[in-house]
């Protein structure tokens, strides 16, 4: 029994956290969040993460990667969620994973080294609106040029390469081949998303795309769940710290039992749920039969928890927690994207029920 | 049981209707014209329909108290979407001045306030004094010649300070007195160099509140309301002046109507979301709470109209509505699904409402303070040793 | 605006409450609850209520009744719920109402005076199992003798007369005409219920039965809701009183903010919901278009609230609240019957949604 | 990450399996025979599979601590439905005696307790001392000749006192000492005339708990555990001895399996209830919480096995499970609908569970006490002034 991170994994997380402490402190985070006009990611922070070979984590060694597992990627996602890091990690990591899983040798050789190094930016396009997110629901077809709309695509405008979910499986679409991006005025300005309209774009299928598409979306669910756990844990800590610091009636508000119980409720919702994303990632790596169900449960439970915890965090902070200047709303807005992206908790619960054979 | 106001008010209601029909909408059709609104309000005051509890010499219509009539007037004005007698800015200062103000203060401030020529902001909360209001630290010192107060410090969560002309505020005027005893209630013109208003942006991007900084701001010595060092008593009467009328149900009812509309409009799995058993059930559950508010308000108003005791809902209302607003916000989220994050889209209002339900749990006394008050005043539990209601 | 009880109504409630204080104190209540063998009602208390003309409340004056309204009956139901009174009020009052609403002159003349005086005991048989409770769902037919099973029939074994919901409307079945009763080992031993098996029982239709059946079940819903409010209010009061009395750590537990907030939650769930049953009864009396929806909402909301409040009451009392000796479980078990009888809150919410035209 | 115990335990697991296969089920097939159970347990102790932390001279098997092995043994025993080393009655006394008992007390009590010849009840709670345990008032006075303690008072919520032979209890032995300081920890034979056991009937009609009355009951002077007046320290170590093993997940997992089965069996609107989207969604949500328990337990055990810090779930477990049990009870209710009230029917178990989830929130420290403990130990909030955890 060793449901724990290895020393290497702990070291990886520590390195990422150290970087984030240095380059993603709240002041900088707010600066990125408040950038004029459309939301943008933090290019400097992303470059530093690429430098640290984060995008290489799951890329095969033959293509310049570290050939690690989804659990390794997920614990990084937790750290990024904890810091609300404004970087295009999610789409990029999934694009690389898609090609590693389903690409031809040529496709792998062409893209993986550059994705691993961060030289090119990749992303994935799953959503088609009205909560159609998953392989069985994709209507767009790559045949004879890709046309149609994909929604909530992470950083599509900046991406050099989009892995698009299509009825035939997965297709590669390169920048400049016939699509337009419209940045959504999304609540979460740390992870901008676009509506992408394909107009006969040149699309190259991944040979194994059909087979690996649901592996890819399961991985996406696990990564989103990891982000949600990281963010929720941060919010609990933030609320506990504030309660110890803030004084009213001549004592820290942490002395008030009513608030204490509310903080306990937040912690009880969050801490025991960590294992859901761990197991979803671990199952993806080692217990493939259990992976789809585990991914659905992790996504449903943790993204719902995260959003609720951010609401509780506002209440625990009083007025200041409702202001733009405070960190809470940045987390709440990430929680909103985590909640909606890839489908709501309700959708994933119905899916978990199907997968359980109920 | 009678859910209208009964035959005795029918004639009065007809009078009010006739009056409104004759004056609103205005002849030129411009519903937003300030002159039109002012003319309507003045005519209504003349008829005794507005500012009924305020003496005529201060600009009111000085009517005998009749809560039934007051409710009829409010209902009819609301039905016709005519201007109400809501005072621009924070009108709570008016009952306070009527109770505690000097004759000169009343003369000087009440009528212009009713007309909207003077607009008030409330200066109570401070960064270190939220639910524990008496911890405030903004100080006022009398100038050596005794002619004016010099104010220094900071207020926060000040609604509408960016369009207000004046503020009523609590200051610490007796630094050596015990916590509650050193506080005075002052009036001050905030359009002066010593006062800086800085909007606080909310997570919704809206700017409803402000921080207000006082840096040697001045106000004449006679702008003290009530006795020096007795401001705490003055405030407590201000906090009491909230009404329990039917108008208080307006926003939850309208939010619920919008929610039903949303559920009908949004498509889910090939049909209207309102056809989904989960949405139907939650909507019906929410409606059950909404109806609880409606009937409890009927009962409160009835008790009020008939001068009977036993009213408890007014004390519970804010917490009840706050929780209900959160529940409605969450159902809207569940209906919106993918659109839940798009603040540039057609559903922005629902995203704002999802967030604003939280602000409700904070503004004007947090939900926990409401719980403390309910525990003491409704359940009759012994006073909380530290956070006692109204402490 | 007069959403208040009249002086006459307040006097009626006071009289009933005085009787209950006298004849339905907790000691006696437990004695009735704990009677050996099958549950029975308190014949003495019921006789006293009949003496007070409670069953006559809605019976027309021509038949020896008081010709009052459903709101009058409902406020009595609240008082009985408050005291957890072990009397066959519900079935009896509804049987009388059924005949007053839908019976022929002869039927009325034959039964109403004796029901009004309590000389005969009546009840109603609505349920047919699997949550079929309401007129449109009744499958049993009175044609050629009534056969089939009705469930959760209040006091059928003791009743002289059962008003049975049938596909033709409502039918009168007298004792000894071909049915057997099996007492259910129901949690609520204050209001025993039977499974009634009709075997070709002689059944006489109420001429207006078809038209008034849903009026009857709406009235039933309002009365159950009133009982639930009365019980819930009692539980809140019981919990508040206990918190003031019980000392731990050298002070009344009412001093602990965590518990205070839990008590506030109970009160917030209960007190504002009173109007739901008031309005359901008032609408039945005066605003018939609104009555079905109001009845569904009152039944759904108040019976759900009641059951939750009884759970909270156990927690507020600690161990003692979980024992047979304490009053709480008697209320919880009444709340269970209120919840289930006539259909669960969920069913009534779906019905309210239908009625709202959603 | 490795969710089994790894290759190093495979051989051990096989050994355990072989042992169990050779001994269980017993030759005569009688799984309930006390002799068969005893024979199995003795053989298992002989092999070092049971009572591993207890010295051989007191009847244990005195093994090196190895939580991995302990978990493997528990898993295999549970899989084969073989007897476990659970001590009949309340076995918490054993680690307490090992830590605080005299050599004579250990000799006299531990082995018979393991064998089930002595069965213990715990005498802590009193009518006036529930969450505030130190408020207890049962007194023990040393007889004039110093040979025995005379006990008077009342204990409550005593599990299994009707089949227990002995009780370990807290008494007030120094009436003039401050609250926590006057308490002693005694052992007493409860099969004596001065002790009356009265079962407490629960709302489920079950009789799990008792009241125990002491009326000049006696126990020898050397039945004191630890020092006189220091019983509070002895108790605190007893309260610590709860384990966090995988076995703790057994009942919620089995309750959930039953719930799924129920949802499949019960028909709703012409199909299995489990096909209703509301039931499916709530079941899946409950499963999410259940899995949180499972994985948190894996993590706790792993931390334990590997001697690492950072374990917090054990502190949260009781409250988490209590709330989950309530949630499962409510879903069962919603599935049962009409059958929810029938305590004579096939669904009695679910009605009991609906109620028992409440008893869980009370027994062994109320949910609010659990919240106090979590606030301090997990969140690191300052100690509650009055209700401080473990005060």
Image (tube, coloured by chain):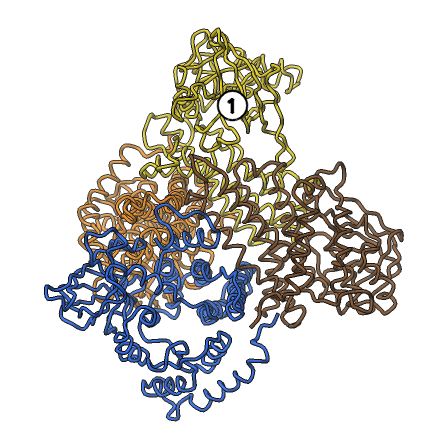
Chain colours: A brown, B yellow, C orange, D blue
Q: Secondary structure at mark 1?
A: strand
In the foreground, C311 or C64: C311
Q: Residue C59: tell me if it is visible.
A: no
Q: Residues within 10 Å of mark 1 (few under 14, many from 20)?
A: many
Q: Residue at x 59, y 60 (%)?
A: A349
Quadrant, the N terminus of chain A: bottom right
- How many labels were placed on the picture? 1
- The location of residue B136, given as percent across then percent down, is 47, 27
Q: Residue at x 39, y 71 (%)?
A: D346
Left or right of D227 in this view: B143: right
Residue corresponding to mark 1: B123
**Could you tell me which chain the residue with mark 1 belongs to?**
B
Residue D371 placement (x, y as % from top left): 42, 53
Quadrant of the rendered structure where residue A30 is? top right
- Residue A290 in the image: state x and y as whole percent: 62, 70
**Is residue B141 visible in the rendered structure shown here?**
yes
- In the rendered image, the vertical position of residue C85 relative to residue A211, given as above or below: above
User: From this viewpoint, which residue is outermost toward the bottom?
Assistant: D27
């Amino acid at each position: 029994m060793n449901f724990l991170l290895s020393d290497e994994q702990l070291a990886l997380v520590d390195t990422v956290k150290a970087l984030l402490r240095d380059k993603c402190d709240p002041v900088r985070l707010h600066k990125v969040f408040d950038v004029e006009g459309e939301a943008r990611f933090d290019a400097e922070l992303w470059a530093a993460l690429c430098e640290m070979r984060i995008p290489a984590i799951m890329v095969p060694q033959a293509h310049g990667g570290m050939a690690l597992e989804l659990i390794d990627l997920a614990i990084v996602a937790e750290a990024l969620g904890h810091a609300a890091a404004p970087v295009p990690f999610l789409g990029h990591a999934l694009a690389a994973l898609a090609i590693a899983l389903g690409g031809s040798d040529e496709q792998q050789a062409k893209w993986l080294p550059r994705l691993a190094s961060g030289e090119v930016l990749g992303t994935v396009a799953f959503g088609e609106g009205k909560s159609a997110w998953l392989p069985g629901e994709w209507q767009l077809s790559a045949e004879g040029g890709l046309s149609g709309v994909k929604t909530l695509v992470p950083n599509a405008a900046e991406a050099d390469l989009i892995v698009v979910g299509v009825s035939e499986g997965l297709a590669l679409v390169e920048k400049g081949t016939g699509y337009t991006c419209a940045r959504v005025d999304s609540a979460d300005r740390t992870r901008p998303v676009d509506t992408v309209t394909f107009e006969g774009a040149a699309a190259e299928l991944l040979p194994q795309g059909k087979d690996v598409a649901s592996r890819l979306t399961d991985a996406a669910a696990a990564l989103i769940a990891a982000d949600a756990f990281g963010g929720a844990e941060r919010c609990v800590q933030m609320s506990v710290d504030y309660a110890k610091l803030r004084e009213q009636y001549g004592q820290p508000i942490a002395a008030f039992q009513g608030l204490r119980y509310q903080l306990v409720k937040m912690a009880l919702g969050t801490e025991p749920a960590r294992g859901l994303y761990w197991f979803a990632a671990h199952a993806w790596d080692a217990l493939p039969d259990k992976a789809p169900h585990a991914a659905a449960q992790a996504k449903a439970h943790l993204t719902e928890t995260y959003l609720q915890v951010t609401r509780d965090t506002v209440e625990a902070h009083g007025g200041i927690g409702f202001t733009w200047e405070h960190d809470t709303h940045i987390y709440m807005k990430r929680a909103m994207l985590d909640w909606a992206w890839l489908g709501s908790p309700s959708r994933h619960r119905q899916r978990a029920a199907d997968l359980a054979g109920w | 049981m009678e859910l209208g106001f009964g035959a005795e008010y029918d004639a009065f209601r007809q009078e009010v209707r006739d009056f409104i029909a004759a004056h609103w909408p205005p002849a030129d059709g411009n519903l937003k014209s300030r002159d039109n609104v002012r003319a309507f309000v003045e005519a209504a005051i003349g008829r005794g329909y507005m500012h009924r509890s305020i003496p005529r010499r201060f600009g009111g219509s000085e009517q005998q108290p009749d809560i039934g009539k007051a409710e009829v007037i409010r209902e009819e004005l609301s039905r016709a979407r005519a201007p109400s007698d809501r005072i621009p800015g924070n009108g709570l200062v008016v009952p306070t001045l009527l109770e505690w103000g000097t004759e000169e203060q009343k003369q000087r401030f009440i009528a212009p306030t009713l007309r909207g020529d003077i607009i008030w902001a409330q200066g109570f909360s401070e960064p270190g004094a939220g639910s524990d209001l008496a911890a405030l630290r903004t100080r006022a010192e009398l100038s050596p010649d005794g002619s004016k107060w010099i104010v220094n410090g900071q207020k926060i969560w000040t609604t509408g300070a960016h369009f207000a002309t004046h503020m009523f505020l609590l200051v610490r005027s007796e630094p050596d007195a015990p916590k509650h005893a050193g506080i005075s209630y002052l009036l001050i013109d905030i359009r002066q160099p010593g006062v800086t208003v800085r909007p606080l942006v909310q997570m919704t991007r809206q700017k409803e509140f402000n921080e207000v900084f006082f840096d040697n701001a001045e106000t004449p010595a006679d702008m003290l309301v009530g006795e020096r060092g007795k401001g705490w008593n003055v405030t407590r009467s201000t906090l009491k002046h909230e009404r329990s009328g039917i108008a208080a149900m307006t926003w939850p009812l309208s939010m619920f109507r919008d929610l039903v509309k949303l559920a009908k409009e949004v498509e889910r799995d090939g049909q209207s979301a309102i056809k989904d058993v989960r949405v139907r059930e939650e909507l019906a559950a929410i409606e059950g709470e909404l109806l609880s508010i409606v009937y409890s308000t009927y009962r409160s108003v009835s008790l009020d109209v008939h001068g009977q005791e036993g009213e408890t809902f007014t004390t519970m209302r804010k917490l009840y509505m706050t929780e209900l607003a959160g529940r409605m916000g969450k159902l809207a989220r569940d209906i919106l699904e993918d659109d839940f994050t798009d603040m540039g889209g057609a559903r922005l209002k629902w995203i704002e409402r999802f967030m604003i339900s939280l602000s409700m749990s904070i503004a004007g006394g947090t939900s926990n303070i409401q719980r403390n008050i309910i525990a003491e005043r409704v359940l009759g539990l012994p006073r909380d040793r530290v956070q006692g209601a109204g402490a």
